[in-house]
Amino acid sequence: MNLMKWNPWNEFSDMEKFIGFPGFSQNFTLALDVYDKDDKIVVEAPLAGIDPEKVQIAIENDILTIEGTVEKKNEIDEKNYYRKEVRSGSFHRSIALPTSVEGDQAEAQYKDGILQVTIPKAAKSTPRTIKVKNIK
């Protein structure tokens, strides 16, 4: 006899099919890789099968936000699926960048299913010595 560990969260996906919670599982988390490359911060996200025209990217106060939608494609021929795990719905991900950046100079490209956002780091301010004036 094989025992399976019960996970209560699995029950919600089945409930959605029968009851139809609108949008309950329609969102998914976008995986991100963030790394330093010389004088830039690079963020990569796998977006295979997602139209890059439906992706919005914003940078405000050193916080990067990537959001968009994935539409279900209607198939012509019917199949008797046991399980179908194709993503659909919307995604929204915001992360604080590890350093100050020049958000207005950011660039994004989409190649081979990977979105890459390159953001120049902000110029570091140089320390300045200030002489105190003695006012009499």
Image (cartoon, rainbow, N blue to C red):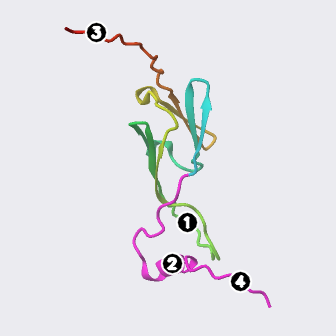
Per the rendering, the mark at residue 133 is 3
Residue 12 tag number? 2
* Left or right placement of residue 112 versus residue 71 in this view: right
As measured in the structure, the alpha-carbon distance from the residue carrying label 1 to the one carrying label 3 is: 81 Å
Q: How many residues crowd mark 3 within 10 Å: few (<14), some (14–19), many (20+)?
A: few
Mark pair 4, 2: CA separation:
18 Å
Q: Amino acid at mark 2?
A: Phe
Pinpoint residue 65: horizontal percent, then vertical percent.
44, 44
Position of the C terminus, as image quadrant, is top left
Q: Earlier in the sequence, mark 3 or mark 2?
A: 2
Disc 4 target residue? 4
How far apart in space, not on screen, are marks 1 and 2 (Cα)?
A: 28 Å
- The residue at the far bottom in this view is 1
- Please tell me in which quadrant of the rendered image residue 58 appears: top left
Q: Residue under label 1, please give it.
A: 76
Q: Give the label, 3 or 2, closer to the camera.
A: 3
Judging depth in this view, the residue of 23 and 124 nearest the camera is: 124
